[in-house]
Amino acid sequence: MPAEVALILADPVDPHRNVASALSRRNLGLLILAAGEYLARPSPAWFRVAEREPLSRDAALARIAARGTHVVVVTLPRPAKVVDDTLYPQIRKAERAVAEEAHRADFTVLGSAGAVDADRVLLLVEVTHGHRASVRLQDGPPAGIDRVGAYLEKWAAPDAAVLQGPYVRGDGSLAVETRRADREIEAVLRAALPTLSLGRDLAVGEGRSAEVVEMGSARESPALERARDELLAKRLPWLPPGPSIR
């Protein structure tokens, strides 16, 4: 069973099928916490869903501005004839893959969310800044090991595209500094998507394309509204509203 599966409940008809495969770790954690709160303070109110006004586009953009962050939206075509209990685990996998790629590319990831419309899958990632530094530090091997020769041959060549180095860092390892080709997170993710493991039915390439834009440019839809709420209005649902962000 894949590591991302939160709970395993065997189908009574097909023991090899997990009927809980669509349950995320987040929702399982929420269920465990809510059950504990209910047992501590039983009340019929726990069985009534509290109505909450979702964030509007303008309110979400104002919240991002107040936080000083950046939200990128990756849009993928929804695969046809794929049932929900197969699709949703792939959406969670794709969400993690995109967030992890942003982290590997030196963006500081604050959170991510995913949702699905009738025709598209949306993956949202919030980062502290939408632009990364123009200079990239290329780590090298420690001085004195065999790989130093190959590293110096590559980076000390007269035509090597370095801004500074090679030099020895404080920890005794070699390093060079190079210039990044792409600085904006949208460009970085757009280039990386065909190489990421997004799930069998969501993979980019072979006729399946993706759109990557900042949140203010994404087309409005119920799925975007749900993902926006999940990303920017996180709060335990049984708690009273928190303070407004100004």
Image (cartoon, rainbow, N blue to C red):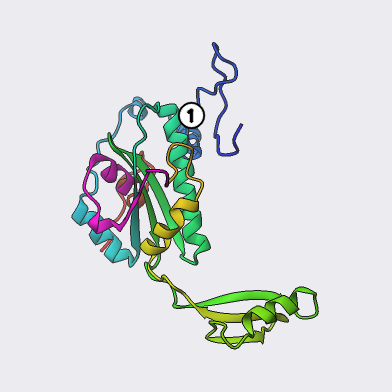
Q: Is residue 30 visible?
A: no
Q: Residue at x 51, y 46 (%)?
A: 197
Identified by mark 1, the residue type is Leu
Q: Does 161 sit above or below residue 124?
A: below
Q: Residue at x 36, y 47 (%)?
A: 209
Q: Residue lying farthest top?
A: 13
Instruction: Residue 157 in the image: state x and y as whole percent.
Output: 63, 85
Q: Residue at x 54, y 34 (%)?
A: 6
Number of numbered callouts drawn: 1
Q: Secondary structure at mark 1?
A: helix
Where does the N terminus fall, quadrant-wise?
top right
Query: Which residue occupies the foreground of this view, 76 or 25?
Result: 76
The 10 Å Cα crowd at callout 1, few under 14, some 14 to 19, many 20 or more, is few
Residue 215 lies in what quarter of the image? Answer: bottom left
Residue 227 counted in the magenta span: yes
Q: Is residue 34 visible?
A: yes
Q: Does 27 sit above or below residue 184?
A: above
Q: Which span is picked out in magenta?
A: 205-228
Quickly name the residue at label 1: 39
Asked if residue 123 lies left or right of residue 165, the reply is left
Instruction: Residue 13 in the image: state x and y as whole percent.
Output: 54, 11
Instruction: Residue 16 in the image: state x and y as whole percent.
Output: 59, 20
Asked if residue 28 lies left or right of residue 60, the reply is right
Residue 142 lies in what quarter of the image? Answer: bottom right
Instruction: Residue 50 in the image: state x and y as whole percent.
Output: 28, 35
Query: Which residue occupies the foreground of this view, 36 or 86?
Result: 86
Q: Residue at x 59, y 35 (%)?
A: 2
Query: Which residue occupies the foreground of this view, 157 or 243?
Result: 157
Where does the C terminus fall, quadrant-wise?
bottom left
